[in-house]
Image (tube, rainbow, N blue to C red):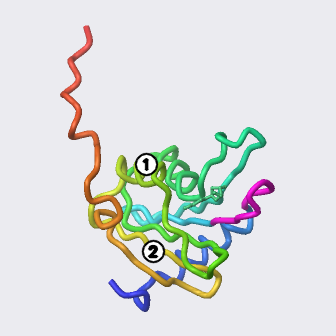
């Protein structure tokens, strides 16, 4: 998939999401927007905390907003930021594991900035060797 095929509307939602970023500690604003398989869009921004481990990335905020509304299947996500060296921001390991819980291997991950989308990966390219639900034993029936 080429950046020229990027979903413009979803990119705009990610840009809008980024405007709400609560990032007084890092000064690094990130926005994200997900498109669910049912066609719904949820945006997110990073939300930091004075207790630093409490910081939550924009990707997880967008995904968890969707999941908390009953939407657990995703077509694509757009993530936008402005990095110091002008590159795109790639999802952190914690966000990749959250994606692993809900994304398919072919869910598209678009990465960009205020000017547009610059890169695209299938989720399976970003986390090819992953631990997921299928690795756990089947839960025993209770009672
Ligand atoms: N951050 C994101 O929101 N997404 C990423 O993909 C990378 C990092 C946030 C977390 C924190 O608020 C700030 O960027 C600096 O790490």
Which quadrant of the figure has residue 119? bottom left
- Quadrant where the N terminus sits is bottom left
The structure residue drawn at horizontal position 40% and vertical position 78%, both measured from the top left corner, is 120
Question: Disc 1 on helix, strand or loop?
Answer: helix
- From this view, report whether residue 37 is shown above or below residue 84: above
Q: Image quarter for residue 35?
A: bottom left
Q: Is residue 132 above or below residue 125?
A: above
Residue 124 relative to residue 21: left or right: left
The residue located at (53%, 58%) in the rendering is 59
Sequence-first disc among 2 and 1: 1
Q: Which mark is residue 98?
A: 1
Q: Tell me the residue at 49%/84% (across/down).
A: 118
Q: Position of residue 100 (x, y in %)?
A: 35, 51
> Which region shows up in magenta?
21-30
- The picture places residue 51, in percent across and down from the top left corner, at 73, 38
Q: Is residue 42 above or below residue 94?
A: below
Q: Furthest residue to the top?
A: 143
Q: Main secondary structure of the magenta part?
A: loop
Q: CA distance from mark 2 to mark 1?
A: 16 Å
Residue 22 shows in this picture: no
Q: Quadrant of ligand 1?
A: bottom right
């Amino acid at each position: 998939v080429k950046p020229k095929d990027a979903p413009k509307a979803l990119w705009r939602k990610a840009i809008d999401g980024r405007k709400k970023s609560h990032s007084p500690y890092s000064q690094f604003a990130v926005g994200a927007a997900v498109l669910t398989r049912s066609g719904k869009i949820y945006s997110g921004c990073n939300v930091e905390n004075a207790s630093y481990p409490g910081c939550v990335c924009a990707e997880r905020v967008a995904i968890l907003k969707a999941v908390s509304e009953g939407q657990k299947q995703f077509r694509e996500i757009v993530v936008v930021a402005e990095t110091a060296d002008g590159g795109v921001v790639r999802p952190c390991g914690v966000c990749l594991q959250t994606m692993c819980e809900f994304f398919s291997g072919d869910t598209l991950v678009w990465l960009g900035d205020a000017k547009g989308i610059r890169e695209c990966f299938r989720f399976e390219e970003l986390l090819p060797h992953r631990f997921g639900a299928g690795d756990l034993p089947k839960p025993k029936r209770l009672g």
